[in-house]
Image (cartoon, grey):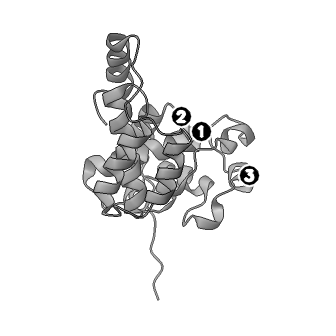
Amino acid sequence: MAEQQIVPSHQLVAPVGRQSGQPVSRCYQCHKCTAGCPVTMAMDLMPHQVVRFVQLGLEEELLKSKTIWQCAACRTCVSRCPNGIDIAAINDALKQRALAKGVQPALPEVAAFHQAFLASVKSKGRVHELGMMFAFKMKTGTYFQDVPLGLKMFRRGKLRLLPEGLKNKARFRALWQGEKGGQA
């Protein structure tokens, strides 16, 4: 069986670095991020491999991976990295890239949650849990799966019927446009 030869391409480093704000080129593959990551057992690519794949320009493999959707964004990678690389931020940039390119997410439920979360923040300025979960349930078709838990949370005052107001909506909109470039 012939081995597939990988031809390195640096065309992914600049856009992912720019979108994530991370110094992707500084990674020298010490694997400290992977050693500390609490979610590696569920990943198909290890955290250090995500950075290496970006460095090699393996976009298709990255955008189709479960790892970019599985990352818990706990930021353990940043605390362990000698260069302060936040792989969760890189994964976020890759998620946005996958969605923009129409790549079918490896974990559609996580992608639906991600989109519902961002839509809630964009429209309300913060997360309105009840509205976000309604949008998520509509996207996934799991309408009644969490109703008992939702009712229990509502009775305990953990879910608000109406979202909290935002004091300075104009400033939030300006920040959203600057940070996300108008995308969500």
- Residue 104 location (% of width, % of height): 31, 61
Quadrant assignment, res 84: top right
Where disc 3 sits, the SS reads helix
Q: Nearer the viewer, mark 1 or mark 2?
A: 1
Disc 3 to disc 1, C-alpha distance? 13 Å
Q: Which residue is mark 2?
A: 22
| Closer to us: 111 or 49 | 111
Where disc 2 sits, the SS reads loop
Q: Which residue is mark 1?
A: 86
- Residue 14 location (% of width, % of height): 42, 36
Q: Amino acid at mark 1?
A: Asp
Where disc 1 sits, the SS reads loop
Quadrant assignment, res 27: top right
Residue sitting at 67 percent across and 38 percent down? 78
Q: Residues within 10 Å of mark 3 (few under 14, many from 20)?
A: some
| The C terminus - image quarter | top left
Left or right: 26 as drawn, with respect to 32: left
Q: Amino acid at mark 3?
A: Gly
Q: Earlier in the sequence, mark 3 or mark 1?
A: 3
- Residue 8 location (% of width, % of height): 45, 55
| Closer to us: 170 or 59 | 170
| Closer to us: 141 or 112 | 141
Q: Which residue is mark 3?
A: 36
Q: Residues within 10 Å of mark 2 (few under 14, many from 20)?
A: many
- Residue 116 location (% of width, % of height): 35, 45
